Image (tube, coloured by chain):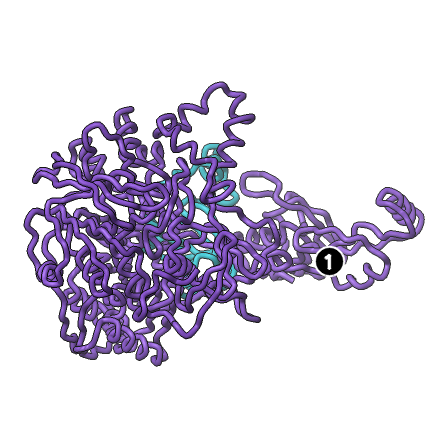
Chain colours: A purple, B cyan
Amino acid sequence: MTQAFRIENGGLINREKKLSFKFNGKTYFGHEGDTLASALLANGVHLVGRSFKYHRPRGFFGAGVDEPYAVVQLYRNGETEPNIKATEQELFEGLEAKSVNCWPSVNFDIGAINNFLRIFLPAGFYYKTFMWPKSFWYRIYEPFIRKAAGLGVASTKHDKERYEHKYEYCDLLIAGSGPSGLAGAYAAAKNGAKVILAEDKPRFGGSLLTSDVNIGNQSGKDWAEGIIAELKTMPNVIVKNRSQIFGYYDHNMLVMSEKVSDHLPSTQKYHPNKRLWYIRAKEVLISSGSIERPIVFGNNDTPGVMLSSAAKEYLKVYGVLVGRKPLVFTNNDSGYETAIEFKKHGVDPVVLDSRKNPESEIIDEAKNLGINIKNSYVVVAAQGYKKVKSADIASISEDKKQLGKIENIQCDCICVSGFWTPTIHLASQSGNKTKFKEEIDAFVPGQSKQNEITLGAANGVFSLEETLKSSFTAGSELSKKITENDKKIAIPNVVEKKFSQHDKFWCVPLPKGKNYKRFLDFQNDVAVSDVEIALREGYRSIEHVKRYTTLGMATDQGKTSNLNGLQLVSEIENKVVPAVGHTTFRPPYTPVSIGAIVGREVGKHSKPTRKSPMHSWHEKNNAVFVDAGVWLRPRYYKRGNENLFEASKREAKNVRTNVGVCDVTTLGKIDVKGPDAAELLNRVYTNAWLKLPVGKARYGVMLREDGIVMDDGTTTRISENHYHMTTTTAQAANVLSHLEYYLQLFALPQNFHSQDL
Amino acid sequence: MLYINCPHCGMRSQNEFSYGGDASVKRPELNKEVSDQEWDDFVYNRKSLRGKHLELWQHISGCRQWIKVERDTATHEIFRTFKADEEVA
Ligand SMILES: [Zn+2]
C-alpha cells in the first residue's frame, strides 16, 4: 500500500528517507521523522486496537502523550515492550508493532461481544457481579478478567538493554520547550544561570510547530529553531529532547526520563536505552502547555473521531491527512485553525460550531476561504463501526437542551475541539493549591508550595504575546536572584490572531429514543451513563466516583477525560466544578519503564560481591560457596562425590581430632581505642569489659535501648586502651552507627574513638 | 527526596542519610534512680506528631555524624539543622 494520505509537500519529516515497518504483520512505509501513528495514518490505517471493557474498535485520538487509544505492543531488536503509545513512538527501519487487547485479531475480536452485553457491564460491575458466589471468583471470573484485561504483555526474558541514572543540579529547570519554555530558558541563560530545558517530544517548539504565528518577523517555528540553536551553544545550558519530566518531588527534586535509544532500530554500543535524571533545581518553570479536550457526543469513540489539534499536527508536522471529508466540531476558535489547514491542502471541511454568532479574525479568514460553517450545530452521533462513515448532526437551542431535526452528513473523520485544559500535573504534584478558572472552564495552578512557577498555556494563558512577555520576565527575574546578572532582553514583536470566547458547552444531549454511548474516558470505556449510575447509587466524592467508575484511572490518567467527568458530576449534583474538586495528580505523568527506574542495579550490579582474602585458597580446595549478605562464604569443601552431609561429617571430625581454621573475614570489625574504650563497651554489651586481660578475647551480647538483642560477637583486648570488636556479618553497619550514636549523642566523660576496619 | 543541610557538610540529598528517630526524647541521666515510667517514656512512648518535629538523622554516606533536623512531618519543610551536641532552643 502506498502512503495514500500523505500530502505532496510540507511537514517536518525527512522525505528523502523512506522506512519500512510492520503493523499486525503487514508491511508499510513511512518516513524518517514519523511517529508510528503518523505513518499508519499516512497509509490510511485507523483501526489500531480494541477498547478495554467493551472491545470496541479504537483508532487514534491524539498526536502525543494524551493518546488514550493507540497503545501497542512494540518489537525492537529481539525485545518486546507493552504499553507503547503509537503517537509517541518514533518510526525506525524495521519497527514492528501489534495491537493489544484483541483476540484473535483487531479486525475480528471475540471480546467485542462485551459491546453487546454492555447493559450488563455498567459502572461498579466488577464490585457487584463478582461478589457471589465466592467460589466463582477463582474458577471463572478472575481467569476471564485476566485474559480480557491488560494493555499488552510484559517480556519474561532478561532485559538486554542498559539503563542509567544521573544526578544533576541547576538554577532553573524548564519543563516544556513551547514558547514559554523557550523564552524563560533564553532569558535565564543570558543571565548566566545554569539551565536545563526538557522537551518530551523529538522536536522542540511545542505549539509553535503547528500554530500560524509570527515572532520577530519570522514564523513561530523558525524563531523556536533559532532560540534552540543558540541555547545549544551555551555552556551553561543543557537542552534535552525526548525527555519527559514525570515527577515533581520534595525540595524541588524532579525526575526526568530520557529516551536515548527508543527511536533507533537498536541501542548503540555503550549507550543506555533510557537515562533517568534526578534533578535538584533551585527554581522550576513549568511550561507544559495544554491539552485539547473533547466534546462528548454519541459514539464519540469511533475510529476517525479525534482531537482537532491532533488532525492539525498530523498535517503540519507529518504531512498526513487524517481524512478527505473532514467534519470539524468545535465550541471555540481552535477548530477553525484545523479547518483552514485542511482547506489550504485542497480538502473541503465542514465546521459545526456550537456557538450562535461567533466573531473573530480567524472565523473571518475561514469564511473568506469559502469554508462551510454551520453555527449552533452539533454532532449528535458518529456513524460507522470500524471507521467514521457519516455523522448525525443537528442544530441546538441556545440553552443547549433541545436538538433540532437530525440530518446525516457524509464524512470520514470528525475533528473535535472542546477548548483547552492546562497541563497542571507537575504543579499539582509539587503541592500547588490549584484553582478553577471560570473563563476557561479548567483548573490552573494557584498558590505555590515549592519554588515553582507555571506560565503560558499551562497557566491558562493562551495569548502568545502575553506568554512570551511573562516568560521572558520570569526567566530574567528568577536567574537574577541567583546569578545577580541583569541582562535586558528585548521582547520580540508578536503577530497572532485574537481568539473569541469559547462556548461553555461540553456534552451533546441524547436525541429522543436513542441511547448512544457517550464516552468520557476513552481508554477505560467510561460513559456518561456510568457516572450517572455512580451518582445515583450514592457516590458523591469525586475520588469515590473515580474508583467506582474507573474514570481517569487508565495509563493515560484521564488527560482527556477528567474535566468532562467533573463537568458531568457538577451538573448532576448541581454544584459548581470547583466545589466538586479534582482528583489528586500523582507521579508519574506518563508511564515510565521499570528498567529506567531500576537503572544499573540489576543482577550482579544490584550489590557488591565481597570475597575474603583467602577466597582463592577456598576455590583451590573445592569450596562450595554460599551467599551470606554481600559475601561469598565457603559452605563446605567438596571431596570427590561427597554431598553436604558427608563433607560436614568429615570436616567436623577433623576439627575434633586435629585442628580447624574458620575464615571470619566476613564479620564486621571495629577498632575501639581511648581511655574510655572499656566504658563504651560496658554500655553497649551486657558483659563487663574492664577486667578482660590484654591479649584475651571475650564473647559479648549487644542490646538496644529497649533491651532487645541487636548483635553478638567476640571482642579482643589488644592493649590497655585498645579493643578489637567483631560483629555479625549482617549487622556490621548497624553496629557502627549504634556506637557512633553513643559517641556523638551521649558524650562520655573522656574521649575515645572507633573505626570501621 | 529531601534536601538536608548537614551542619558539617552542607546541602545533601536524603539518600546520603538514614533516619534515626525522635530527637526530642531525653535519655535519663546515668547513675541516678530512674523510675519505670521514665524508662518507658524514653524507650517506647512517641508522639507521632503532625507538624514541626525534631528528628535524628545520620549522614551515613558522608561525614557519619548524627545530626538533629527540625522538620514538618506533613509538608516535609526543614526549618533548621543542628550538630549532635548542639542544644535546640
Ligand atoms: Zn555531613
Say what amino acid the circle numbered 1 marks: Thr
Residue A568 seen in this snapshot = yes
Cβ of mark 1 under 8 A from ligand 1: no
Left/right of residue A103 with respect to residue A473 in the rendered view = right
Q: Position of residue A11 (x, y in %)?
A: 31, 68
Disc 1: host chain: A
Q: Position of residue A86 (x, y in %)?
A: 41, 55
Name the residue at 33% across, 71% down.
A195
Q: Image quadrant for the N terminus of chain B?
A: bottom left
Nearer to the camera, A588 or A262? A262
Residue A260 against residue A131 in the figure, above or below: below
Residue A452 seen in this snapshot = no
Which of the 4 image quarters holds residue A694? Answer: bottom right
Name the residue at 34% across, 30% down.
A123
Q: Is mark 1 on a helix, strand or loop?
A: loop
Q: Where is residue A410 in the image (x, y as percent from the top left)?
A: 24, 47
Nearer to the camera, A424 or A388? A388
Q: Residue furthest top?
A: A133
Left/right of residue A691 with respect to residue A223 in the rendered view = right
Q: Mark 1 points at which residue?
A: A665
Nearer to the camera, A97 or A581? A97
Tell how many labels: 1
Q: How crowded is mark 1: few (under 14 residues within 10 Å), some or many (20 or more)?
A: some
Q: Position of residue A561 (x, y in %)?
A: 29, 44
Left/right of residue A76 with respect to residue A541 in the rendered view = right
Name the residue at 77% across, 61% down.
A615
Left/right of residue A385 with respect to residue A471 in the rendered view = right
